[in-house]
Amino acid sequence: MLTVRAAKSFVPLLALSSILSGCAGLGLLVKSPGPVRKLHDGIDAVLADSIFVPTQASMKVVSLDSNEVLYERDSRLLMRPASNMKLLTASAALRVLGTNHEFETEVLRDTSMSDGVLQGNLYFKGYGDPILQTSDLDTLVQQIKASGITAVQGSVVADVSYFDDLPWGSGWMWDDEPYDYDAMISPLTINDNCVHVKVAPGLRAGDSAIVSIDPTTTYVLLLNTAKTVMDTVVQPLEVSRLFKERSNTIVVKGEILATSAPVEVDVSVWRPELYAAQLLTEALKRDSVEVENQPTAGVVPSFGDVVARCEHGLDSALVHMDQVSDNLTAELLLKSLGVAKSGTPGTSQGGTYVVRDFLSSIGIDTTRILSVDGSGLSFYNLLTAEAITQLLESMSRQEDIFPLFYASLPIAGIDGTLRNRMKGTPAEGNVRAKTGTISGASSLSGYVTTADGERLAFSMLMQNFNYPTRLYQRAQDRIAALLASFSRNGRVTQR
């Protein structure tokens, strides 16, 4: 039984209870977070994974349509960008060299001919073309023959005077040399300065592995001790080069299962300019043009006459660089930028000056970052997610060069370094971005369109981890899917 005093105090409580119940029924008491807040929470949840406890993660997402910052986390933190450095190289190359820039490779002669016999040398001069392949040599040989040359009493001489003589970038790892991603830099480049090695099992246990090299050339030697096994591989297959000996001997050792598919590896070559000269010599001989002496290196005399020329466009170079993340292409572009600014010989230092000058012109404070190469292979490079998104924003507004810049980027789940990522998510076929991976660092930066059609630019930089890189790539993919499905209007994207 309530007393009068208790009853008086209970009435307001009943009234308050009715008000709260009514409000709850109307959905006014608990308000759902807005779409941007939901996006924040979703990204934070991904980055809350335990793999990020010892790891630095830097990120920024901006709307290209509203200029709104949708997400930001330590975006001014200096990070190792890995191959995201190629975004800087590509953008500067497009602005400074121009979309119609052509890379040339020339063959010149230094003396007159007598009855088709060149009494001197053929000079093979490179101007930084990253696309030259063995197949292009046939075109050059036909032009050489069309000039009347049927034999060469001298040599094919490789001329690499267009660049300086530093074959690696600043801060590169010495023991990366035999691998394709660390191929030597030369203005006379062919086949990415690598040979393609294919290793297949023999027919029976104990048989030697079957090894082939493409292109077939005497420039490299093969040392094959690899064996075929039927069940368990005890000694893993290794394909490398005797790089410490400055040798072009390809070494294949270890074991391969009899049921295994062929293993294919690209191995870099020592002194790639002589590799190119040797391949041209061999191509000439195959087409009945005799060359008397072995290839060598030198400089075209001032009176040299062009007898053959091959060209490839900047567009092909950018696609090659970004799609497969080719480091050599990036370094050739960087030294070409050095030539554009300061003349020959082109240097990486001159190229990085041009890149920094371009970045300054679009408002990026270059005193707050550090760039020393064109590819991102160097551990000296330091960029921020803020600087990268600022670059991406600026490029999106430059109508004359943006289409080629955008088209060169890999598409999630479709091609390039993203062909196997983000499949079955809203990001598939949507995200266009540059990947980046070096030891202990992973990055992803580019563009995505939301469920509402809003255009976003983003940068994700992660470093200082010793877990498998794929774990951080999966986190990036999850975040990219969140961005692709983001909607300000409550739309739901399903795949």
Image (cartoon, rainbow, N blue to C red):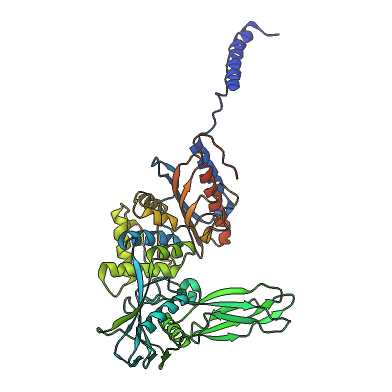
The image shows residue 284, relative to residue 434, as above or below, that is below
State the residue at coordinates (30%, 61%): 96
Pinpoint residue 352: horizontal percent, then vertical percent: 33, 65
Residue toward you, 25 or 241: 241
Residue found at x 57% / y 83%: 251
Q: Residue at x 56, y 27 (%)?
A: 30
In this picture, is 371 found above or below 221? above
Front-most of residues 118 and 356: 118
Q: How many marks?
A: 0
Relative image position of residue 204 (x, y in whole percent): 73, 82
Q: Is residue 140 left or right of residue 428?
A: left
Where 137 falls versus 57 (above or below)?
below
At which x and y percent is residue 158? 37, 83
For the C terminus, the quadrant is top right
Res. 185 in view: yes
Whole-percent x, y for residue 113 in the image: 31, 91
Q: Quadrant of residue 101?
A: bottom left
Q: Nearer the viewer, residue 135 or 15?
A: 135
The N terminus sits in image quarter? top right
Give the vertical position of 431 relative to 379 (above or below): above
- In which image quadrant can residue 313 be found? bottom left
Q: Quadrant of residue 304?
A: bottom left
Task: Report whether 227 appears left or right of 270.
Answer: right
Can residue 461 be seen here? The reply is: no
- Residue, x 27% and y 67% (percent of image)? 341
